[in-house]
Structures are given as C-alpha cells and as structure tokens.
Image (cartoon, rainbow, N blue to C red):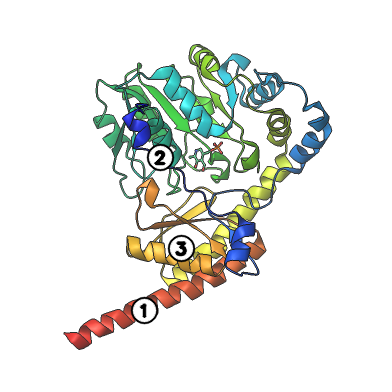
Amino acid sequence: MINIPKWVKDLQPYKPGKPISELVDAKNLKRIVKLASNENPLGPSPKAIEAIKKFASESHRYVDPASTELVKAIARKYDKKSGQIICGHGVDNLLTYYLMAFTREHDEVLTSGGTFIGLYVNTNKIGRQLTTVPLRDYSIDLNAIYSNISPRTKIIYLANPNNPTGTIFSRGQFEEFMIKVPKDIIVLLDEAYSEYVPPGTDLPNGTDYDYENLIVSRSFSKCHGLAGLRVGFAIGPENLIKELYKVKLTFEPNHCAQVAAAAALEDNEFIARTIELNKKSLALMIAKFDQLGIDRIESYANFILMLMPSEEIAADFCDQCLKRGLILRHVRPFGIANGVRINSGTEDETIFAIDVITEVYRKLLDSQTAHAGNFEDNG
Ligand SMILES: Cc1ncc(COP(=O)(O)O)c(C=O)c1O
C-alpha cells in the first residue's frame, strides 16, 4: 500500500465556490454579485488587456524564466536591483517557494491567527509546524509574535494590511520588531493590499527597507485586476532571491501574465480609478452597516470584515445572502468564526449588496428578537 504522508492525509481539500453561471441556474436567480475574493470590480487594467492581445501570438514560445522585462519594470518602480526581485504565479505560489527554500522538516512557521489562509495551507501542505498567536483587537500582535519565537522558528509571516481584518501595524512597530528578531529568521511581509492604504497613513512600506532577513511580497491580483492570470513578486536580499529561483517552476509566470503585469504596473490611471472606487464603495457600505448596527473592523484594504453575534449566525447570514444572489466570504477557515468579509464593488454592485444585506440582517434581527421573546414567555 502507498504510504501517504500524514500531513497530506490531514489536509482539507479546497472547497471552491460554485461558478457564477452554475449558481444562476441552480438558484434560479436573475443576478449574482460576487464580493467574496477581494478582486478588482473594475476588471483587469485596460493596458494589461492591450498587452495580452498584442503578445498573444507569441504564446507558442516557452516563457522567459527570469521574467526579465517585468523584473526590470519592477526594479525601476521600486528602485531595486533586478537580482533582488523574483516573479511567480501569485503571492500564494511564492509562499510555497519560501517554505521550500528556507525550511526543513520540523522547522516552524510563526504567524498570527486570523490572517491569510494561503499561509496556513501552504505550511500544512509541506508538513511544516505552523504556530499562530492570537490577534489583539483584531490586529496582528507583533509583541506576541516576538515572544513566541522558538529555536525552531525559521519564518515569520506578516500581512500588512492583514486579510481578513484589514488592520495594519505602524512603521514604528514594524521597525522595533525587525530590530529585535534574530537575523537567522526570515520575515515575510505580505503587502498584497498596500495600494489601498490612504496616503499619509503610518504604514511601513516594505520596499523601503534593506534588512538582510526581510522579503516583501506584492500581488497583481488586487488593484491591478489580474487575479485570474496569477502573478505576484517578491523583493528581498539578492542572496535569498537567488535561492528562490532554484525552487521556482522554471516557466513561471506564464507569458500573458508577464506582459500583462508589466503593462498594469505602469497603468497609474487605472490604479487611481480603482482606489477611488474602493473608497466610495466601502464608504457607502460602512454608512449602511453602522446604521443597521452591524459590528465591523476598521479596514485599510479593499474589504470590510463584519462581525456577527455568533459563528452560526455568520454562516446563516452568508447563506441567506447567497440565496438572494450575493456571494460573501465566511472567514471561519481563517480563524475568525463569526467573521464575514465583503469587498468593494462597482456602484451598482455596492447598491445591490447593501440592499441584500439590509434585508437579510433585519430578518436575522427579527428572528433573534422572536427567539428572545419565546424565552421570556417560557421563563
Ligand atoms: C494577504 C494576501 N496575500 C496574498 C494573497 C494572494 O495573492 P495572489 O493572488 O497573488 O496569490 C491574498 C489573496 O487574497 C491575500 O489576501
């Protein structure tokens, strides 16, 4: 019999949501609005689409494994050397490479509870020890993470802004943390949402630092609108980036992803439009949630985490919204059992989402009040 490693046997298979087209048929709905994956509601950057069309005819060629043109564009934008940059099939895939290149069996990856699920999945996938410390007021607690460093800790993962809470830590907190952390531990700073953070916010910009043990990840899936193409990059010290190239899938990212990302990187008009829409959409949602009394976390990203009174109510809330055509994310697998995440939408999607949420939340409140009434009657 084949002896499958325990850590693989213990993995939970990824449960994808039904494709939108299937949901329309299955639930007999006129419309589905998906605000569950923090995607860009405007679609891809138009410059990226142009680039794909222009270079699609080169798709019979194997790709440039070093993503030379894309790496040069990133190096120019962030004032780095090309040797400090690596591109991959999204930040998610880069996480696998960090683990492959920098950890051995029995090594530990240290992070926060209530953070990006991709880190948990990737760590478990290759059988490394995952240690999490609780969030503090829904924010990553750098002091607690520092206190939990053990001799086996090889990687510390920090998402800033954090997903699914949207919270941040400050420049001062980060610098104090980096000074204390032993230099033989790699700190992964995931900045997938940094473009959404309002200017003037006290937020460390990972690309400004040159710590010998810091690797910063950025994604093209969010404000550049290229989630489906799978492309992200890392910036770090040359000696570490060099090792990542050895474990990377050779022909990655694919051809269309490379040309599209290079074009999207320079599409400032699209990025500005995305940020503006995000601000407006979230402001409308916040106003409504506050009016309804929905508890929520202050967010610096392109989504809001709503807190329901219980895990069951969060699950029911998502189900009821789905029945009306609105797809939200119940973030129980991230470690926040009563959390429901919604990302920004177009104006039209935002109004639709607000209407659905208002109806569902009021019904939930009514049924709770009725329950409470029953208890009183019985009491
Ligand atoms: C913090 C964080 N990092 C990385 C990712 C994934 O990025 P990519 O699509 O580049 O793999 C996400 C996606 O939701 C995220 O929330």
Residue density around tag 2, few if under 14, some if 14–19, many if 20 or more, within 10 Å: some
Residue 178 position in % (x across, y down)? 37, 25
Name the one closer to the observer, 80 or 369: 369
Residue 117 position in % (x across, y down)? 42, 41
Q: Residue at x 35, y 17 (%)?
A: 183
Residue 68 drawn above or below residue 190? above
Residue type marked 2: Phe
Marks 2 and 3, Cα distance to the nearest angstrom? 29 Å
Mark closest to the chain's N terminus, 2 or 1? 2
Q: Which numbered dot is residue 367?
A: 1
Please identify the quarter of the rendering in which residue 280 is found: bottom right
* Secondary structure of residue under mark 1: helix
Residue density around tag 1, few if under 14, some if 14–19, many if 20 or more, within 10 Å: few
Ligand 1 within 8 Å of the CB at mark 3: no
* Residue located beneath label 2 in the image: 169
Name the one closer to the observer, 100 or 195: 100
Residue 83 drawn above or below residue 97? above
Q: Which numbered dot is residue 318?
A: 3
Residue density around tag 3, few if under 14, some if 14–19, many if 20 or more, within 10 Å: some
Q: Residue at x 36, y 41 (%)?
A: 140
Residue 105 drawn above or below residue 123? above
Q: Are marks 3 and 1 in contact (CB under 8 Å)?
A: no
Residue 40 position in % (x across, y down)? 63, 49
One can see residue 293 in this view: yes
Left/right placement of residue 273 relative to residue 296 reads: right
* Secondary structure of residue under mark 3: helix
Mark closest to the chain's N terminus, 2 or 3? 2
